[in-house]
């Protein structure tokens, strides 16, 4: 398991999955935007060929497979792979 020997490595990866101080709905997404994540890094959103988000260290983008799931503290969008800072 990737995090068995280094659980502290999980915190920055989880923080890289949260947009800093914003509730962003799918209607707010535009092609090429680079939102700043809670961890301080940025990701890239592309809409060509379906909505995708790419982490800085990912070889390819993650597909956004479900959107606008409203929770008590924000909005969740489901992706199909882990974003890497």
Image (tube, helix red, strand yellow):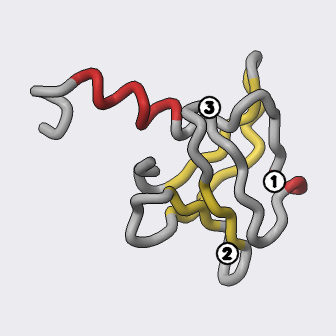
Q: Quadrant of residue 7?
A: top left
Q: Earlier in the sequence, mark 3 or mark 2?
A: 3
Q: Residue, x 17% and y 39% (percent of image)? A: 2
Q: Which residue extends farthest top?
A: 72
**67 to the left or right of 39:** right
The residue at the far front in this view is: 40
The front one of 40 and 44 is 40
Q: Quadrant of residue 59?
A: bottom left
Instruction: Check disc 3 and report its element: helix, strand or loop.
Output: loop
Residue 51 % position (x, y): 68, 68
| Marks 2 and 1, how far apart at CA | 12 Å
Q: Which mark is residue 50?
A: 2
Q: Are marks 3 and 2 in contact (CB under 8 Å)?
A: no
Residue 4, above or below 30: above
Disc 1: which residue: 26
Quadrant in which the N terminus appears: top left
Which callout, 3 or 2, points to the residue nearer the camera? Answer: 3
Q: Residue at x 72, y 50 (%)?
A: 35
* Residue that carries the numbered disc 3 in the rendered image: 38
């Amino acid at each position: 398991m990737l995090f068995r020997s280094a659980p502290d490595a999980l915190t920055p990866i989880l923080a890289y999955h949260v947009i800093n101080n914003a509730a962003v709905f799918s209607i707010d997404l535009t092609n090429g935007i680079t939102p700043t994540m809670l961890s301080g890094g940025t990701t890239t959103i592309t809409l060509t060929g379906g909505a995708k988000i790419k982490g800085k260290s990912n070889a390819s983008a993650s597909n956004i497979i479900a959107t606008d799931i409203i929770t008590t503290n924000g909005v969740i969008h489901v992706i199909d792979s882990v974003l890497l800072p």
